[in-house]
Image (cartoon, helix red, strand yellow):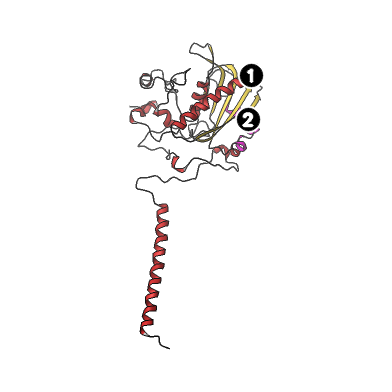
């Protein structure tokens, strides 16, 4: 049976229109797929894959609440910009995201904390973490400290005399390894979905507080040793304030001393005093309202992706500065 010429033409026309719409639909889907993976020229593609803290590798899951758009750019060494080995290293990588703080109140045969003394230290720590949280909020940095909650605070007695000499920190790492295993820090930090882990060792003695930093090769666990009574430059006891907690925590997250204690002849000492006289990493402050954070500090703790050219000199190793 032969269809009339007009019917055959209409049928052919209908088939061509159907093919056209099918092709357009496929092209539109392809364009949507391409647009989902393209980024503007020169931009950095951020992902939602976050590096799991090394201390939580045993079957743990690391999550984050930081929006993708607020993630820092990669911090691998780049010859075209300054790099600090203490930055983005160890358990306390960057001061952002969910930071779990472990508090260990140590005691030996000569020292321990009473209930009221422990509460005093807790209050100073609260002031310190609140100060940093406020600074982060002003800077648009997502930061959430998790501390003094279930499984995060311990009393621990040791069978040796805890030294108060900063030049003898060899006891800190072995003790931390013991405590870390005994109280299952890995499991606890995973339960709190920690992006970073910070540790305070509290000691009810007079001494100069200090921190062990991770530089990618030397230490792995960052720890701050906080003495309830500090020492001034003459060796006289002074009550430690929230400043000690702030200063030492910033060390854990990569900041360095801008008074260069191991380099007394370093010309940067006078330069830093002139440029940022009230910097938290340079001078002790009893009034945190007058304390400041330099661009070098902010870069070290992950709140900046780069350092202004004029401040690069403050973070370079001594042998590299020009």
Horizontal side of 186 relative to 94 (left or right) equals: right
Residue 179 circle label: 2
Q: Classify mark 1: helix, strand or loop.
A: helix
Magenta stretch: dominant secondary structure:
helix
Q: Nearer the viewer, residue 116 or 57?
A: 116
Give the magenta part as a residue range. 171-188
Q: Is residue 315 visible?
A: no
Tell me the quarter of the image containing the C terminus: top left
Q: Is residue 117 visible?
A: yes
Label 1: how many Cα within 10 Å (few below 14, some 14–19, many 20+): few
Residue 42 coordinates in the image, percent (x, y): 35, 45
Q: Quadrant of residue 259?
A: top left
The image shows residue 246, relative to residue 100, as above or below, that is above
Assess whether residue 178 is covered by the magenta stretch: yes
Residue 218 coordinates in the image, percent (x, y): 50, 31
Horizontal side of 227 relative to 271 (left or right) equals: right
Residue at the disc numbered 1: 116
Assess whether residue 140 is covered by the magenta stretch: no
Q: Earlier in the sequence, mark 1 or mark 2?
A: 1
Tell me the quarter of the image containing the N terminus: bottom left
Who's the residue at 53% across and 30% down the image? 222
Q: Nearer the viewer, residue 272 or 13?
A: 13
Residue 48 coordinates in the image, percent (x, y): 49, 45
The reply to whether discs 1 and 2 touch (Cβ–Cβ < 8 Å) is no
Q: Nearer the viewer, residue 276 or 159?
A: 276
Residue 306 coordinates in the image, percent (x, y): 38, 34
Q: Nearer the viewer, residue 72 or 316?
A: 72
Cα distance, mark 1 to mark 2?
24 Å
Q: Classify mark 2: helix, strand or loop.
A: helix
- Mark 1 or mark 2, whichever is nearer to me: 1
Who's the residue at 43% across and 28% down the image? 297
């Amino acid at each position: 049976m032969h269809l009339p010429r007009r019917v055959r033409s209409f049928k052919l026309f209908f088939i061509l229109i159907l093919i056209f719409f099918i092709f357009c639909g496929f092209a539109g889907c392809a364009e949507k797929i391409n647009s989902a993976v393209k980024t503007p020229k020169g931009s950095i593609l951020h992902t939602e894959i976050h590096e799991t803290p090394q201390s939580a590798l045993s079957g743990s899951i690391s999550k984050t609440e930081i929006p993708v758009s607020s993630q820092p750019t990669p911090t691998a060494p780049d010859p075209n910009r300054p790099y600090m080995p203490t930055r983005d290293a160890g358990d306390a990588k960057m001061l952002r995201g969910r930071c779990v703080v472990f508090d260990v109140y140590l005691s030996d045969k000569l020292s321990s904390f009473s209930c009221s003394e422990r509460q005093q230290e807790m209050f100073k720590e609260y002031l310190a973490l609140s100060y940093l949280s406020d600074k982060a909020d002003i800077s648009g940095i997502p930061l959430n400290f998790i501390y003094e909650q279930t499984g995060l605070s311990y009393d621990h007695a040791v069978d040796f005399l805890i030294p108060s000499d900063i030049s003898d920190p060899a006891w800190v790492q072995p003790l931390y390894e013991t405590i870390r295993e005994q109280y299952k820090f890995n499991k606890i930090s995973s339960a709190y979905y920690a992006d970073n882990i910070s540790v305070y060792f509290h000691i009810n003695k007079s001494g100069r507080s200090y921190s062990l930093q991770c530089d990618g090769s030397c230490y792995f666990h960052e720890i701050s040793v906080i003495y309830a009574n500090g020492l001034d430059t003459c060796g006289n006891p002074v009550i430690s304030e929230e400043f000690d907690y702030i200063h030492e925590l910033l060390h854990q997250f990569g900041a360095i001393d801008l008074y260069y204690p191991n380099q007394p002849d370093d010309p940067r000492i006078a330069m830093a005093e002139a440029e940022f006289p009230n910097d938290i990493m340079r001078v002790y402050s009893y009034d945190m309202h007058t304390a400041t954070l330099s661009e070098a500090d902010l870069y070290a703790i992950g709140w900046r992706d780069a350092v202004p050219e004029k401040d690069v000199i403050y973070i370079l190793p001594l042998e590299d500065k020009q």
